[in-house]
Image: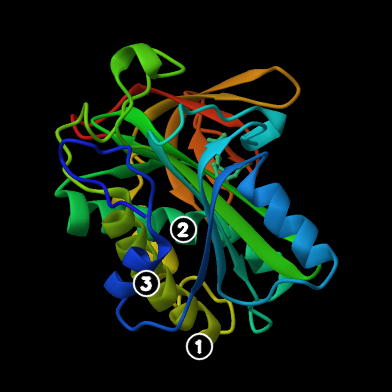
Amino acid sequence: MSTATPDDPRAPIDPADVVARLAPPGRWTIDWTAQTGSTNADLAARAESGRVGQGQVLVTEEQTAGRGRAGRDWHCPPGAGLMFSVALDLPAVPMDRRGWVGAVLGLSIVAGLRRSAAVDATLKWPNDVLIGGAKCAGILGEVAGGLLIVGSGINVSLTRQELPRADATSLTLSGGVADRATLLAAILDELAQWCDRWTAAAGDVDVAGIRPAYLSVCSTVGAQVRVLLPTEHWVFGEAVDVDAGGALTVREASGARRSFTVGDVVHVRTSPTG
Ligand code: BTN
């Protein structure tokens, strides 16, 4: 199988190439497929029937039914994105802390982008990956068969015309330089380390350093935001914290503080990087 070159960034990912770049190797088992409905759905189905275990990764060139957050779709032209899902078996992490899995992958992506693509990214609550304030990647976490299934779609070489929304970006458009195999290996290395810390801390995101690391790269905290609630109501204010339960705290103009576990955030005014 061919490997991506600067001339052909959409050449198929070679799973052996990803494995060769992992440090240490052996933590992850990598399956590749040219096309599938959804890598999250595939791993979730395998988990439900006990056919997948800790460390299974599924990466694809194209999804025909990619899933996004809140029941939305995820679209990306073939070969233009890094679309993958990971199965995690973390029995030491209590159920009520597992909602952090998206943030844990988000931290791994931010670090992986810095390491392999020389790009500075931030996280928008709960776990959109932004470059220069525009969305470059989305993350979807779910529970299936007692495992955590967490997947991401990273816009790698999409042109402006190929992006699904005007407020999105791709790595290429942001000046990043990474082939997808190198990027995936870097993300998986980071993810392995965060999972070890999370397990060692029995799921406590403060002891594991996950929450402090998240807050340090979260461009939502400190920004003026609008939060669209599932009830279709908007809340306005300054985002001031993400608590250990993963809830976003917003201070309204009245001084009242409200916490949200779900919702879509718009950054109204933010720092130049976020
Ligand atoms: C979002 O709405 O921002 C989350 C998008 C998550 C998309 C990824 S692509 C790989 C994995 N498989 C899916 O069906 N969804 C996730």
Quadrant of the rendering where the C terminus is positioned? top left
Foreground of the two, 10 or 197: 10
Task: Classify 57 as above or below 194.
Answer: above
- Residue at disc 3, CB closer than 8 Å to ligand 1: no
Lateral position of residue 244 relative to residue 268, left or right? right
Lateral position of residue 201 relative to residue 89, left or right? left
Residue at coordinates 44% horizontally, 77% vertically from top-left? 208
Q: Residue furthest front?
A: 1
Q: Secondary structure at mark 3?
A: helix
Give the label on residue 200, or none: 1
Give the label on residue 19, or none: 3
The answer to whether residue 43 of the structure is visible from this angle is: yes
Instruction: Residue type at mark 2: give it.
Output: Leu
Q: N-terminal of the two: label 2 or label 3?
A: 3
Task: Classify 151 as above or below 61.
Answer: below
Q: Which residue is mark 2?
A: 105
Label 3 crowd bin: few (<14), some (14–19), many (20+), radius 10 Å: many
Residue at coordinates 61% horizontally, 35% vertically from top-left? 68
Q: Position of residue 195 (x, y in %)?
A: 49, 76
Label 1 crowd bin: few (<14), some (14–19), many (20+), radius 10 Å: some
Q: N-terminal of the two: label 3 or label 1?
A: 3
Q: Position of residue 54 (x, y in %)?
A: 62, 77
Q: Position of residue 31 (x, y in %)?
A: 54, 63
Q: N-terminal of the two: label 2 or label 1?
A: 2
Quadrant of the rendering where the N terminus is positioned? bottom left
Instruction: Residue type at mark 3: give it.
Output: Val
- Image quadrant assignment for residue 268: top left
Q: Position of residue 273 (x, y in %)?
A: 20, 34
